[in-house]
Image: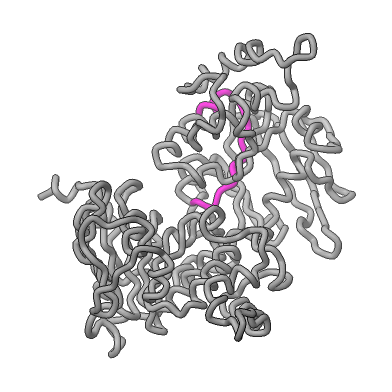
Amino acid sequence: MIDPILEMRRVSKSFFSIKALRGVDLTVYPGEIHALMGENGAGKSTLMKILSGAYRPDQGGEIRIEGKPVHFNGPHAGRAAGISIIYQELSLAPNLSVAQNIYLGREVSRFGMLAREAMEAGVGPILERLGADFAPSTLVADLSMGQRQLVEIARALHARSKILIMDEPTTALSAGESERLFGLIRWLRAEGLAIIYISHRMDEVYALGDRVTVLRDGTLVGSLDKPEIRADTIVRLMVGRDVSSFYKKEHDPRNDANALRGAPSLAAVDIADGRRVKGCSLTVHAGEVVGLAGLVGAGRTELAHLIIGAAAMTAGHVEIEGRTVDISTPGEALDAGIAYLTEDRKALGLFLDMSCLDNINLAVLGRDARLGGIVDRDKARDRARKAFAALGIRAADIRVAAGSLSGGNQQKVLLSRLLATTPKVLILDEPTRGVDVGAKSEIYSIIDNLAKAGTAVLVISSDLPEIIGICDRVIVMRAGSIAGEIKRTAPAPLDQEQIMALATGMEQLDA
């Protein structure tokens, strides 16, 4: 039997009184893709930072690389031992070339000057092996996210890494870029590299994982071999409850006497932008959760941007409760009662350096201002505390920076800001992207409660089980147009195959 390349035994880590890890064991073999899963805060990142040398473990644990005990006093020692980590937020310097990034910290110089040509020649063969379509001299700022991932992998190979840690590597990638990355990861496995793959996405774990280790609350709760990898088993290990309670769908507007009557809360009528969106119409009633599905590039986000005034329409109009509204900016959309949750909360949603208190109150500062434009801080604090309680936001205090929270809690802070405006219509674009399983379930419960309270909810999602689990009906887009609509008919659930047939055009082939 092959010997393990990595053994972590009884690894613990405390931060003051908080136990982040409690005696965790992890074994990884060469030529293996080992998936590491768990909710945000489960201890995955802490464990990997200990392995890479960024953190030092508490006394009593042991780490062995190729059977030999190791003690790292910093990331440099970890890299010297053959461990590379690619973080979710890539650590490349955009103003430097590909070659300079790969050699960063190990630069080649001659006569006190950087030997750029020598470094470019040194990385050329590795880029060629990886199938890169860019030159070593290319500035990283000019590369796509998929190409930047390739540079990170090239850097690990150039450093002769034995263990590669990948933290949510597909978060910012398109479907095509993700598929190319998967092919590359399989090739790296065949080359004998040990890969620790951190992801919240079940489909990625199914596609890649040879084994899965699950952490919960800083403790190892299970390891599964390939034949044992099942969604219900992983979810039960991660959150400590059965998968049947995962999707929260208690409200059915068909059983609500006040729902689905009169004019819809939102109607988009023959909307187009002259490029990506082609004469699309949809409606959402009060108390209804409508899904907007389709493949990447189908035009879902572009349609939402037209509705909220973030992009200019060339045709069509928007109606709120039967009345045509003229919306040319997202601010005007808020005034009309439409709130939009962006798919990119870090770049376009939250102010990460600002407190949760200020983030939550940002959209209603003018409404709260007293005479002379002075903000009512007591009202703002009360609103933030109520949002923390209502949405279950986990943070030490409302004054902590939003950027210090986990992905799920960041998403709930952003959602709290929108709900403070008391919208009639809520458009959620990929509401659980980059969010762990437990937080996903909590967000589904929030959506269900909003529908119960009479909010019209439009959910854009690439996660078909999510769409099926929480929506009353689904509108499917294909190539910028509405391809069809599927309604929930009790007791049967929404049909995933029907949705995919509409999204891909296969229903036309079957006709």
Q: Which residue is drawn at 67% across and 67% down?
A: 355
Q: Does the magenta stretch include residue 198?
A: yes
Q: Residue at x 49, y 22 (%)?
A: 134
Q: Residue furthest toward the right?
A: 59
Q: Nearer the viewer, residue 181 or 267?
A: 267
Q: Position of residue 34 (x, y in %)?
A: 60, 41
Q: Position of residue 378 (x, y in %)?
A: 67, 84
* The N terminus - image quarter: top right
Quadrant housing residue 43: bottom right
Q: Which region is colored magenta?
A: 186-201
Q: Which of 53 and 391 is in front in this view?
A: 391
Quadrant housing residue 484: bottom left
Q: Can residue 429 be seen in this view?
A: yes
Answer with left or right where residue 383 lies relative to residue 295. right
Answer with left or right where residue 489 lies relative to residue 16. left
Q: What is the tally of numbered marks visible in this picture? A: 0
Q: Residue furthest toward the front?
A: 372
Q: Is residue 165 visible?
A: no
Q: Does the magenta stretch include residue 84?
A: no
Q: Position of residue 419 (x, y in %)?
A: 49, 76
Q: Which residue is drawn at 60% across and 17% down?
A: 123
Q: Which residue is drawn at 69% across and 13% down?
A: 115
Q: Which of 454 and 314 is in front in this view?
A: 314
